[in-house]
Amino acid sequence: MPDRNLAARRLMAVTEEELQRIVLDIHDGPVQNLFAALSQLTILRSQISGTQSSTEECVAVINRTINLLTTSLGDIRDLLGTFRSPEFAKSGLSEIVEDIVIQHESISSGTVTLEMKDPLPESASLQVKIALCRILQESLSNVRRHSGVENATVKLWAEKGCLFLEISDQGRGFEPPLLNGPKATEKHEHIGLRGMRERAALVGGEFSVESHPGAGTQIRVEVPTYE
């Protein structure tokens, strides 16, 4: 059984790092893209006013600007989606998971194959629902940002007093760091994986990731149904 006090302390540290990462993501992503889009529009204005460029050149600038703005909008919606809190207390786990999947598809060009095996327990605690759904949000965000593919599969089922959540893709994959034991990663670049690990540990669960370069990624969480 994971040490929940340790998990709580580590999760607090991870949360602070996550906030810093969000600030940097906004600065290095949407803000830079918006500045670039502004620059493109400035160039276009000069070209049009000076009538020095062909229609094709103006269209190319417009297309680059549209792409920059579209990317920025997707990044901003993705970041805001992280803070969108489903009605955890009032909704069942299956309803919350479906909502997160729909939200992900609405802010990305990808699709998610969702497989939920009945019966799913209605008695899952609030803490368990929050942990599973935050892990799902982070995993789908990673698929969009890092996998190189647009599709993912999410599976949710109950078995022998435990809930299982699995998120997988067939993308570029990576070499996962150690997540358990004395040599477990505490590196900043692994903050997403660390956060998912601590959220699972906080509710007495287990978290694992399987991935290899070129062979996709699978996130798996197992938590007890009752808290």
Image (cartoon, rainbow, N blue to C red):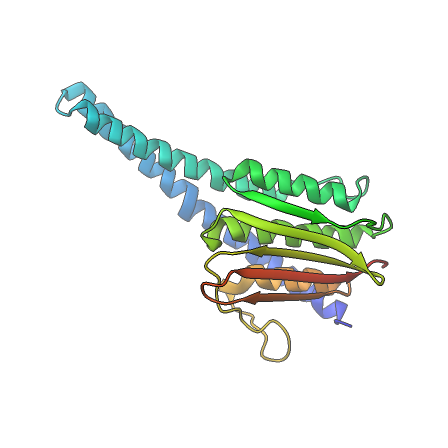
Residue at point 20%, 23% (across, down): 55
Q: Quadrant of the N terminus?
A: bottom right
Name which quarter of the figure residue 202 lies in.
bottom right
* Image spot of residue 216 (x, y percent): 51, 60
Residue at point 68%, 39% (across, down): 99
43 and 168: which is toward the camera: 168
* Image spot of residue 118 (x, y percent): 80, 49
Is any part of residue 20 visible from this angle?
yes
Residue farthest to the bottom, as pictured: 182
Q: Is residue 148 left or right of residue 61?
A: right
Q: Quadrant of the C terminus?
A: bottom right
Residue at point 54%, 71% (across, down): 177
Residue at point 27%, 33% (across, down): 40
Q: Is residue 50 above or below residue 203?
A: above
Is any part of residue 42 visible from this angle?
no
Q: Is residue 34 above or below residue 183?
A: above
Q: Is residue 50 left or right of residue 105?
A: left
* Image spot of residue 224 (x, y percent): 81, 62
Name which quarter of the figure residue 49 lies in.
top left
